[in-house]
Amino acid sequence: MSFPQKAGHMPHELAGKTRVTATDRLFRALVANSVDIYVIVRPDLTISFQSQTTHDILGYGAEALVDRHALDFIHPDDRDRIQRQLESAHRTMDWLFASAFRVAHKNGSWVWMESRFRNLLADPDVAGILCSLRDITHTHRLESQLQEAEELARFGHWRWVKGAPAPTWSAGVARLLNQPVENLPVTGDWYRDLIHPDDCDDLLSKFLDAFETHEPVNTVTRFLTGDGTYRYIKTHAYVELEANSEVGALVGLAEDVTVEIETERARQASEAKYRLMAEEASDVVTHYDLEGRVIFMSEAIMDVLGRMPEEFIGNRLCFDIIHPDDASLLTETTQSLLASGGVRRLDYRCRHAEGHYVWLETTLRASTDPATGRIKEIFGISRDLTERKRHEFELMEARERAEEASRTKSQFLANMSHELRTPLNAIIGFSEILRLQMFGDLGHSRYLEYAQLINESGGLLLDLISDILDMSKIEAGKFDLYLEHFSIDEAVESCLRLVRGRAEENGLTLTKTVSPDYCDFMLHADQRSIKQILLNLLSNALKFTPRGGRVELSLARAKGMLTIKVCDTGKGIPADQISRLGRPFEQIMGDSSLAKQGTGLGLALVRSLSELHGGSFTLESELGVGTCVTITLPEKQAMTEDRQEEEVMPEMQWGLSLAD
């Protein structure tokens, strides 16, 4: 290959060759009309040839660069890099690429170039390094302007080549995220290090979809910054297609919209506040001066009191329409507000235009002067609560009637203790005399049978009445605990002796167990009530446990509390009925095999007596397995025998009707 002498300068070694072929003329025309500069550099880095384009781009004539050292025209900051790349070209036959560097123009300015080097030292027609230089000044200027625009407008760009592990980030993106560009992630899981966990999967899914659908992506995502906080970044990404219409890369613009997002949220919050005020416009808004005169009254007053706002303007606190019984309350409230500021709320009655009174709930707020701190005006918001007051009064009256009825009933039953027990004791006593034939034979055996029935029925009736009376005393607050020190073991053994015969008759095993660290001690409590608790629990367990079953009473002590547990191997209780047990007169329903004779007061008394002692009551059961009732009692009672009347629990309220 040969190069022209004047239309570019031919190497001196080729000057003697004068024959020009058609191919030579073709190559000469191509080089002369190329937009790139072609230069041949000898091994000593001097220039042996320059193309005509050198004049067009750099302003140098055809002879200007020949025999000059190539590095003389390179910017000092770029010389070492270009020299290394030229020397590398001597060692390879491949094209080498030199990224942007600056070359001196004849007028003294610098022109940005990029170059490709090719080793043609072995070609006798060239005998040097062929350098192809392209002017990229305009492109470099655009890139610089883009970087400046990114910095000024606070946006950045990135490019994610298909198949690459991560995008390449611009300096603008790094500035948005307040960290060096080299710190931005470049591995395959870059999104986990950079994106908020709640946004990560959504953003990655949109990017991957874009590779497949070629559709642009517009989204707002939280990116992690260098100081550990998150900023809202608006991303617009589009696909870059290759010649075969396949996606080659995903290119994106990133813009910091944190301020806009926060501003929008503040705007929405403000709108919500004013929307709430609009929705509450049915309330009456009033503005008072320091003399209590009305400066402004909203039109909602027409719906509340049937009066026009103009009726109130200039009047002092509307005392002429306030109920006489409430006027002093309003006066005291406003005086307190003017004296100490703050907020006051009060309920009072105002006369409606039709003559009846309307209950108003008013909130008064004192407004102060920011400069002096003195109160300058008062604002009030009033709403109609007549209907609510009516319901409150009805509920109060209903509650008073119910409480009075409950007190009357409980007092009656409490007072009936002696009157009900005395005749029953006589029935039981005389039937016992008949049954034992203490004064001689009765004669016919039927008399003994009937005496036995009378005795048993009387005993059952006495137990029933005793339970009812005890329950009524507890509800009326008349049940007194007679506290004393007694051995808990002796009380337990006494109860076990009373029920052991029944257990043997029913073919049941009755046992007592204690925890490893347990020892007998003196419990401070009402001994009669504790025995009643034990007997009720044991009787219930024996009653509901089939023949061959087992009933176990266990004792344990821990942290000043005594735990008594009675467990049986009976049929158990349905889960949906457990919550009902422990309330007066409640029994298991729906299963005749589980329903036994009784009043449903046993567990209610156990619970009430336990709570009177400051303890607790829990019941656990499983169908087909059995039931466990656990009672916890404090070892020392803090209450005195002069116990005050206590509030009746809702679940302990029950009623009784007596027929004449």
Image (spheres, rainbow, N blue to C red):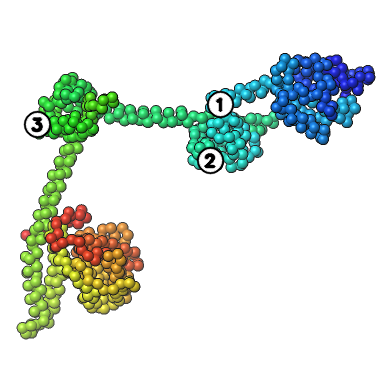
Q: Amino acid at mark 3?
A: Pro
Residue hosting label 2: 201
Verify CB contact (< 8 Å) between mark 1 and mark 3: no
As helix, strand or loop, the secondary structure at mark 3 comes to helix
The nearer-to-camera label among 3 and 2 is 3
Q: Residue at x 70, y 22 (%)?
A: 112
Quadrant position of residue 244: top right
The nearer-to-camera label among 1 and 3 is 1
Vertical comparison of 561 with 505: above or below = above
The circle on residue 324 is 3
Tell me, yes or no, if residue 550 can be seen here: yes
The circle on residue 205 is none
Q: Amino acid at mark 1?
A: Glu
Q: Looking at the image, is mark 1 or mark 3 earlier in the sequence?
A: 1
- Spatial CA distance of label 3 from label 2 is 69 Å
Q: Looking at the image, is mark 3 or mark 2 earlier in the sequence?
A: 2
Q: Quadrant of the C terminus?
A: bottom left
